[in-house]
Amino acid sequence: MIGAGLITLSVGFLMAEGIKDTGVYFLTPGELAVRVAEDASMYDVAIRVGGNVVEGSIERDIATLTITFEVTDDDATFPVVYVGLAPDTFTDEVEVVVEGRLLADGTIYATDVLAKCGSRYEAVYEEKSTT
């Protein structure tokens, strides 16, 4: 009984630690701004921020594959720095989800950027004429 209890506790502890290490907050820019104002420990933790790319804010450095842009939800705006290839659907005003860390300088350093496809792949229905 004692051995089974120890094994159960060990497995439970390992599961809890694994979830804590891989857990990621999902916030809008407005929610992130409120959280940061209330709790400075939100800096340098894994986060996901969902919002829209600010029109005209995308800058690309092709030599270093660095993309800088701003993400907003109209309540708050954060600058984002991402090194890598952006999705094909990544353009101005597209809805994005940015994964990364917010550092003390107020910039989100992204490890992944996901862009919404929009209606690009939805079926187009045409009215058929009956003549």
Image (spheres, rainbow, N blue to C red):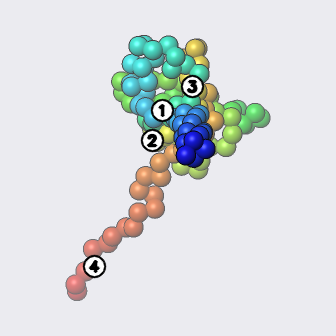
| Residue name at image x 52 percent, y 31 percent | 47
Do the CB atoms of the residues marked 3 and 4 lie less than 8 Å apart? no
Cα–Cα span, label 1 and label 2: 18 Å
Does 53 sit left or right of 81 as displayed? left
| Residue name at image x 45 percent, y 41 percent | 95
Amino acid type, mark 4: Lys
Residue 92 versus residue 18: which sits nearer the camera? 18
Compared to 36, does 61 lie above or below?
below
Q: Which residue is mark 2?
A: 95
Snapshot quadrant of residue 123: bottom left
Q: Which residue is mark 1?
A: 25
Q: Position of residue 88 (x, y in %)?
A: 58, 50
Q: Which residue is mark 4?
A: 128
| Residue name at image x 68 percent, y 34 percent | 83
Regarding mark 2 in the picture, which secondary structure is present there?
strand
Snapshot quadrant of residue 74: top left
Q: Which residue is mark 3?
A: 45
Q: Residue furthest left?
A: 130
